[in-house]
Amino acid sequence: LTDAYCNRGWAYYDKGQFDLALADFNKAIELKPRLARAYLGRAAAYLGKGQFDLSIADFNRAIELDPALIQLVEEALRELEGR
């Protein structure tokens, strides 16, 4: 079930529907509080909304839970710099 919320959250994110994405990532985190990719998704959605402090906190939490995600976070931030 958490995978479904994460996948739908990313689909909403891709459409720019950040509030809907946040709702799904929040639900995934509620169901599985140590799901790093849900924090990564929520961080991206917060970033899309310009809520940088919340985004940074969730990026940090995602990396704390799964250090391998640091590469994805770095790629996301580089992509943003190019915009």
Image (cartoon, rainbow, N blue to C red):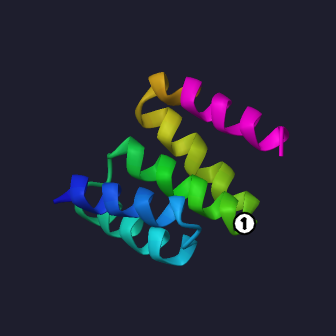
Please check the rendered image and state whether residue 29 is part of the magenta-colored stretch, yes or no.
no
Residue 40 spot, x, y in % from top left: 50, 47
Residue 54 spot, x, y in % from top left: 65, 61
Residue 21 spot, x, y in % from top left: 46, 68
Q: Hey, which residue is sitting farthest front in the picture?
A: 15
Circle 1 Cα neighbour tier, 10 Å, few/some/many (<14 / 14–19 / ≥20): few
Residue 55, by quadrant, is: bottom right
Please check the rendered image and state whether residue 72 is part of the magenta-colored stretch, yes or no.
yes
Left or right placement of residue 38 versus residue 67 in this view: left
**Magenta stretch mostly in which secondary structure?**
helix
- The amino acid beneath tag 1 is Gln
Left or right placement of residue 6 versus residue 64 in this view: left
Which span of residues is magenta-colored? 71-83
- In the picture, the quarter occupied by the N terminus is bottom left
Left or right placement of residue 30 versus residue 78 in this view: left
Q: Nearer the viewer, residue 13 or 34?
A: 13
Left or right placement of residue 76 versus residue 15 in this view: right
Residue at 32% across / 69% down in the picture? Answer: 27
Residue at 68% across / 58% down in the picture? Answer: 47
In the rendered image, which residue does mark 1 sit on? 51
Figure check: 74 above or below 59: above
Q: How many marks?
A: 1
Residue at 39% across / 42% down in the picture? Answer: 36
Q: Secondary structure at mark 1?
A: loop
Residue at 23% across / 52% down in the picture? Answer: 3
